[in-house]
Amino acid sequence: MQLSGRGVALSVGASMLFAVLPGYVQWLTPLDGVQVFAQRVLWSIPLVLLLVLLARQTSLLRASFVRLRREPLLLAACPLAAALIGVQWGLFLWAPLAGHMLEVSMGYFLLPLAMVLTGRLFYGERLRPLQQLAVTCAMLGVLHELWRTQAFSWLTLITALGYPPYFMLRRWMRLDALSGFVLEMLVLAPLAIWLIIAYGPVGAFSDRPLLWLLVPVMALIGTLAFAAYMASSRLLPLGLFGILSYVEPVLLFAVALLVLGERFDSGQWLTYLPIWGAVLLVGWDSARLLRKQQRESIRPR
C-alpha cells in the first residue's frame, strides 16, 4: 500500500481549518446560518479563482470548461455534485438554529465509518492491521455515543450517507480539487444570491462594516479547508481518508472546551477516548508507512 504524505498533511490541515469555523462564525452577527451559507458560497468564487491563479492551474480550469462542452455526462454531474455538497453545507448551518445539532453531530461521527465501508465495497480497499484496530476503536466510541444520546434520525442518515456518494461522484468526474470547487460554487451562486436578496437582514453590512472583513476571511478559511479536503480525497484511499476525518471532531472538542467554554459531560469520555485512540493509531501507522517508503526510495538499487 503506497501512502501519500501530502494527502495525509492536506487532510489534517483541512481538519484544523474546519475546526476554526464554529468559533469564528459567532463573530458574524447579525447573519444567521442561511446567510452565512449564502455569503460563503459567493465569496468563495473570487477566492478560489485567486487560488487557481496562485497555484498556476488556469490551464486545468480551462480544460475543465472544455470537457463540460464535450462531455454531456460531466455537464449533468456538476449540478448533482453541487446539490450534494450544498445540502451538507446547508444542513450543517441550519441544524443549530433548528435545535437538531445533536442528530447532525451523530452523523459526522458515523461518516468516517461510512467512508471506510464505501472504500471496501466499491473500491476493494483493504485496511492495514493498525487501521482495522483504529476503525474498531472508533466504532466503539460511536456506538457508545449513539446509546448515550439516542440521537439518530433522518438528519443523521443524510449527514452520514450524503458525503460518500459525493466523493465517489467527484472521483468519477476526474476534476482537480480547485476546478471542481469553482464549478460547484458557480452552480450554487444563483441560489446564494436569491437567499441574500429574499432573506438577508437589511443594512447588515452598513450597520456593522467589520463584516466586510470578517465574511471574506470566513470564506477564505472555508475555501482553503475544502480545497485541501478535496485534494486529500484524491490522494488517499477512501478508507484511510475516512479514518483521518476523525481528526476534525477531536479538534472541535478542543475548540468547544477551550474557546467556546462549553461544559464536558463525564459520560462523553467513553465516546472520545476510543476516537482519540483511533486517531493516534492511524497517525502512528501512517508515520511508520511513510518512513518505510522513504527508506525504500533511498535504498541503492
Image: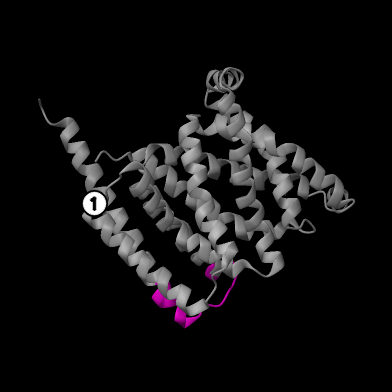
Residue 261, quarter of picture = bottom right
Residues 104 and 122: in front is: 122
Residue 185, quarter of picture = top right
Magenta stretch in the rendered image: 257-272
Residue at x 80% of width, y 47% of height: 195
Whether residue 24 is visible: no
| SS under mark 1 | loop
Determine if the magenta segment contains residue 293.
no
> Which residue lies under the disc numbered 1?
128
On-image quarter of the C terminus:
top left
The three-letter amino acid code for the residue at tag 1 is Arg
Residues 193 and 115: in front is: 115
On-image quarter of the N terminus:
top left
How packed is label 1: few (under 14 Cα within 10 Å), some, or many (20 or more)?
few
x and y, in percent, of residue 91 in the image = 64, 56
Above-or-below relation of 207 to 71: below
Residue at x 49% of width, y 66% of height: 254
